[in-house]
Every structure is written in structure tokens, then in C-alpha cells.
Image (tube, rainbow, N blue to C red):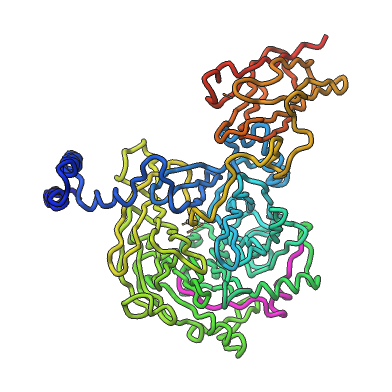
Amino acid sequence: MRTRTGFRSVLAAGVLLAGTASPAGAQSMRDVQQAAEARGLTTADLLAAAKTFTPTGMKDEYIIFSSGGHSGQVFVIGVPSMRLLRTIAVFTPEPWQGWGYGVGEEILADGDVNGQPNRWGDTHHPALSETNGDYDGQFLFINDKANARVAVIDLRDFETKQIVKNPLIINDHGGTFVTPNTEYVIEGAQYSTPWAQEYAPIHEYREKYKGSVTMWKFDREKGRIDESQSFAIELPPYWQDLSDAGKLVSDGYMFLNSINTELATGGIENKKPPFEAGVSMNATDYLHIIDWHKAEKVYKAGKTMEVNGFPVIPLNVVIEEGLLYLTPEPRSPHGVDVTPKGDFLVVAGKLDPHVTVYSFAKIKDAIANQTFSGKDDFGVPVLDFDSVVEAQVEVGLGPLHTQFGPDGYAYTSLFLDSAVARWTLGGPYASGHSEPDWTLVHKTPVHYNVGHIGAAEGDTVSPDGKYLVSYNKWSVDRFFPTGPLLPQNFQLIDISKQGSEMPVIYDMPIGVGEPHYAQIIKADKLDPWTVYPEIGWDPQTQAVDPWAPRPKMERVERKDDHTVEVYMTAVRSHFTPEHVVVKEGDKVIWRITNIERAVDATHGFCVPQFDINLSLEPGETATFEFIADEPGTYPYYCTEFCSALHLEMMGYFLVEPRE
Ligand code: RUQ
Ligand code: CUA
């Protein structure tokens, strides 16, 4: 709020500083005061600006990898500047990166659903690769909730390398998250369907509809998911929701919560309870506790069934082998988050003002002593709630997701309150902060309707604190209204001080898709290339392409009556060759290498009519193919303003009519 007191405190602060400065210093302080006064800024605003303003050339300390929601992409954002640095094209074609317009097409096609191209995605939960439970800066994974797909991004060049389509499910949500050494990338299902979404009437829900979690084996050496070493675990047909992997003391376990343990099937049009009511009827749902180390052994022992060509550990084996235990969790849980030492799990129930903290030690004891309160309808043992809960902390309305600081603080987003709560973890964390154990300390209001939050390295074994970002769904009145579709709002919160000082210091409008989760990594853990390592580099294989065109070998070569190969190089400010002549109906295999070694010397390449548009970073080679089925004269040109003679960086593609 802009108040007169605000102005006066700016002036007071200015006078105070000016009093101790040189005459020149005093003048510049007066300039600051004047500028602040003219814009109605308070001292708090100036302080926030000082904490976030990033002059030219200064780099950000942290990097956010944010889901791009239904844009299907990933956003890369600097902290504390909150500047958007890049989008990474993943499930959706993206012209600037040339993704899906000549290159990337095979990777996108690997994500086709039963042969049907789906050229968008609903990305929710990015997961950075981890070593010993800490981000290692090598890879990023992200799920597509709409079509149950998982993508792999290599952080050497920030490009998508692989998309896998889950053969069992059509939606996912509890993913991606990784095990502490990225042995597996995990994808939990969400809305239950029959396997491979085959048809089954809704009244056969209990028998035919399935829950599951898929364990995608990650081959770090190859930088790819190894589908041949991956498997799934059948779960009851609850809607598995968010998930997290155990770490340190809980390494080897993973935790998924669920909604719809009611097995509601909706039907508002037939006067049945709508899903929103049916799914929230029970006072508790089930937290799923899965021993994935054991599950891996069961898979390797071949105790699986084959579903749509994919190995699945069936529910009866899951129960017999003791892979899965349930325990009640309060109303409509959403997030489950494992504390930094791996000793507690925090579950937030959307319809319960508390977060529920489970002790992993108590869970282990309850499993060992078989402290069950019964079994669920499918025969899965249910651990007695009271014997596994450590604490319940009342944090506010609509708690969703929790992150952690280095100082024994936990942070939970409150959707209904539009706030971020800071509360204290007890037990071994209690000494990190001055407040009593398991207590709400403070709530910072955010604008508005926060979903996920992300603290700097806040879901690892060593959270950094310092910054927290609130990923808000609604911005309402915070920005200039861009018509009825408004941007969402990423708010940066300074969490460097203890207690109740936790101010919002920056608002960043996000005008593309609806981001969900985002992870924040220390920038110095990333070591991206600024040019590709060698000329002729193929980013899809991360190796030199032996076919890459090189200087002096440029040519147009007719292979047979219907195939032409083009070997082209690009350098400021020409393509070689500048004339490419083919015949109508020819298959054209076109290879281009950007032979530049200068940082940022990217060339674009487009051919009208044939839907070709590439981005060629220094050293990169690309190969694309098309049928020249339309005779004519087509200028091709460079789409990046690369030099003073960029406009001249062009050539003619001539398609001669066949008689
Ligand atoms: S889920 S906030 Cu995927 Cu919470 Cu969106
Ligand atoms: Cu190359 Cu413009």
C-alpha cells in the first residue's frame, strides 16, 4: 500500500544516508529520493529493488526450472532478477528453437499416442537429476499430465533429448520425481482407467480400472531413459496424486498420496454425486508407502505380468511381497514432501487446515510390528494412523505443497488463504530456529491462489534457504489487464531472515501456460556449453555427426532419380551453396552445419512452403527431409539477425516441374 508514511520513510532513510556521504553521494541520494517519490515507492520497495535489481552483466545466483503448464514447455528463470532467460521446447513445437519444424520431429513422434500426434503437453512437475539426494545439474525430467509422457532434457545444451509415452496409462500426475541417485524417474498415474485406456463401462470401475506407478530406469551414461529396464507397480484404483522419493534414512522408499479412495464414478447428469463431492466423502484417503528397492528385486525376479508389452508387478504380488502399505491421510491430500534428512513426510490436505507429519522411523516400526488398523478393500495392509503420525500443525486454509529451508523451517502453500506459511520442524531440526517445535511462525500473503512453492534447493538433502518463489495461479489486479486472460504471478519471497520477516520482493507475470511446480538450483551447479564442443555436432546424439557438411565439401548431390542430398554450411553472412535446384517430387535430404565458433553466433534457416525452420547454434548440424512436391521458386534465408549483412544471408531453392 502506498501511504504518505511510505514517502516520509523514503525521505528519512535518504536523509540518514545522505548525512554520511560525500556531496556527490548526497546528490545521488536526493536523486534516488526524487525518483522514488515520483513513482510513489516506499522504503520497503527500494529495499526490495536493491535485493532484486540486476544490472547488465551481473548474473543470477539461482536458476528456476519451471513447468510451463499446458504450454507443454519448461521455463528457465533467473533469481533474484526473475528474468525469463529461455523456454525449453518439450512437448510443443517451438519456432524460435526450430523444435518440430525440421528437427526434433522424431523425438516428438516418440510421444505419439497410439500413432496420434499430440503436439502439446500439460507439464506439471520438473525434476532435476540428483546425486546423493542433491541436485547435480546434469538433467531435467518433466511429465505431461494429459497424455502420460515423460521427457528428458540435457542441461549441457538445455534441449529435449527424449520423450517416452507410458504404455499403461493416459494421465499421470505423481511425477516426475527421481530417486536420490536418479536410478529411476518415477511417474505416478492419476485418473484411473483400464490398462492402456481400453474401453470398460464406468460401472466396472472397481474391477477394471487401475492405479499404478511407473519406474523409468535412467541411464545416466547415455542420458536416456532405458525402457527395456523399466517397470510398473499396480496399485488400487485410487487416484494417485503427488509423490516424493525417500532420501537418506528413507532411501529405498517412495510415497504417493491419493484421492478418490471412495472409488467415486461421478455422473452429475444422472443426479449422482458429482466427482467434487464423491471424491471428498471420506474423512481420510491413503498415503501409499512403497519399498522400491524391494520392488526392483521383484521385477528382476520376473514376478511381473505383461501389459501392452510392459512389465507390471500385479497387485496380488505387490501385497504378497510387502511392497505396499497404506496409511490414512486427512481429507483430499495433495502434496507429500520428504524432509531434508528423509526422516519425516509432510502431507497437506486441501480440506484440512493442518499439515500432517509422518515419522519414517514410526512407519518402519509399524511395518515391522504389523501395527495395522485393517486392510483396504483390495487387501492392502493399512498402518495405524496414530502409530505413524508425529505431529499435526495448523497452518491455514487449503494447504497444498511444502518446501524446506536449511534452518528447520518448512514452508507450505495455502491455496485458500493465498499465503505461504512458515512453520517449524521439530525433532532433530528444532535447534535450527528459536521457536518451539511444530509451530506456525508466520504467513506471508501472496497474490493470489498459490499452487506450488519452490525454495532454493528446497526439496533436496541440503536446502539453501534465502529465496522462495510462490507460483500463483491468479494475478487479478496486480498487472495491466491483458484482456480477460490474465498472466499468472511468480512472487519472489526473501526467506533469509528468521521469524516473521518474510517479505515479497518481486512480482513476475507469467503469460504462457499455467506453471505448476518449479525447482530452484544454485546457478554454479550448472555448466552449460556456450558453443557446441565441435563443428558438426548433432544435439540429438550429443556427438559429431559423420555426415555433417564441412567447408569445401558443400554440394548438391543427386542420389537417384528421386532423391537429392544437400550439404550446406552456414557462416556469417552466407549459406553455401546459394542455389539448390531439385525436381518436382524429389525427396530432399538436407544437411546444414553452422561452422561458427563465436558465442551466440546462431543462424536460423527457413524454407517457406515446406514448413522448415531451424535454429543452428554454433557448431550444430541438423538434417531434415521433405518431398519437394510443389514446383516453384523459394528463397531460403537466415531467421536470426546474425550480422550487418544478415538480410543477404539467403539463397534460392528451385523446384523444377517434371514433364
Ligand atoms: S499440482 S499446483 Cu500438478 Cu499442485 Cu499443480
Ligand atoms: Cu545468419 Cu542471419
Which quarter of the figure has residue 199?
A: bottom right
Q: Residue at x 48, y 65 (%)?
A: 335
- Quadrant of ligand 2: it is top right
- Percent position of residue 587, x then y: 79, 24
Question: Among all residues in the image, which is located at the extreme front?
Answer: 22
- Percent position of residue 408, x then y: 40, 73
The answer to whether 447 appears left or right of 245 in the picture is left
Q: Say how many tags the image has.
A: 0
Closer to the camera in the image, 415 or 100: 100
Q: Is residue 68 visible?
A: yes
Give the residues in magenta.
311-331
Does the magenta portion include 557? no
Quarter the C terminus occupies: top right
Does residue 548 lie above or below 136 as drawn? above
Q: Is residue 209 visible?
A: no
Closer to the camera in the image, 198 or 606: 606
The answer to whether 610 appears left or right of 385 in the picture is right
- Percent position of residue 149, x then y: 64, 52
Which quarter of the figure has residue 567?
A: top right
Question: Among all residues in the image, which is located at the extreme right?
Answer: 560
The answer to whether 519 appears left or right of 195 in the picture is left
Q: Residue at x 53, y 56 (%)?
A: 525
Question: Among all residues in the image, which is located at the extreme top?
Answer: 659
Does residue 42 lie above or below 390 as drawn? above
- Percent position of residue 526, x then y: 55, 52
Does the magenta portion include 317? yes
Closer to the camera in the image, 253 or 198: 253
Which quarter of the figure has residue 35?
A: top left
